[in-house]
Image: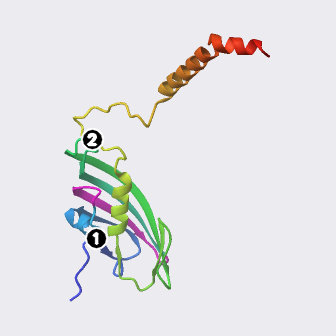
Amino acid sequence: MNKKKPYSIGIAGLKNGKHQFELELSQQLLDLFESELMENISGNAILHLAKSETAVEVEVELDANVTLLSDRSLREYEQKLDAHQKVFFKFSDHYEMLEDDLIKIPFNEDSIDFSQIIYDLIALSLPTKRLHPDEEEEEDLFYTTLEEGEELEDEVEDEEEEKSNDPRWDILKKLK
């Protein structure tokens, strides 16, 4: 018995033209990839398909909430994700991934599995710095703004001036 994959869309019976599908995002998607990036997910992925004789153009629209862990306190919090991506499937005699958004699929392909595409879009939409909304964003030692960088530069210049005004150096300069 062939079990239908939860994030697959059957394209064999689709007529040429535009179609829309809505896939529910759940823990099942995270379990497919044994994800440690997020704790839970809920929401929808809306797929806008435009099928022709030679290709299938898909726009994936993501509207989801994910549960993340704060980098600082390890407290869970909800993060809203809203993202879009276009993917082109070109009919060919074999399967081949040419680029992230351009994939060749066999003419006789009866369905397209979107689980990897959706998961990758979610992963790329996650914030790099994960802070619980209750936590204040403190000054990060590794990143400085332009003003902070200018202040640090001024401090270095002040230190250099102090060194150049050292009377011991003045005596040595006289020896030249």
Vertical relation: 60 (above or below) 104: above
Q: Is residue 25 left or right of residue 125?
A: left
**Which residue type carries mark 2?**
Arg
Q: Position of residue 141 (x, y in %)?
A: 41, 34
Q: Which residue is mark 2?
A: 72
Give x and y (percent) for residue 121.
Answer: 37, 58
Q: Residue at x 23, y 56 (%)?
A: 43
Is 129 located above or below residue 163 in the figure?
A: below
**Closest to the observer, 67 or 14:** 67
Q: Indicate the position of residue 50 as horizontal and vertical percent values.
A: 41, 68
Give the vertical position of 85 relative to 4 (above or below): above
**Res. 124 mark:** none
- For image coordinates 20% across by 63% down, the residue present is 27
- Quick one: quadrant of the N terminus? bottom left
Residue 36 vs residue 28, the one in the foreground: 36
Seen at 31% across and 60% down, the residue is 46
Instruction: Specify the principal SS of the magenta part.
Output: strand
Q: Which residues are magenta?
A: 36-54
| Residue kind at label 1, given as amino acid type | Tyr
Q: Does the rendering let one see residue 165?
A: no
For label 1, the residue is 7
Give coordinates of residue 168: x percent, y percent.
64, 13
Mark 2–mark 1 Cα distance, whole angstroms, equals 34 Å
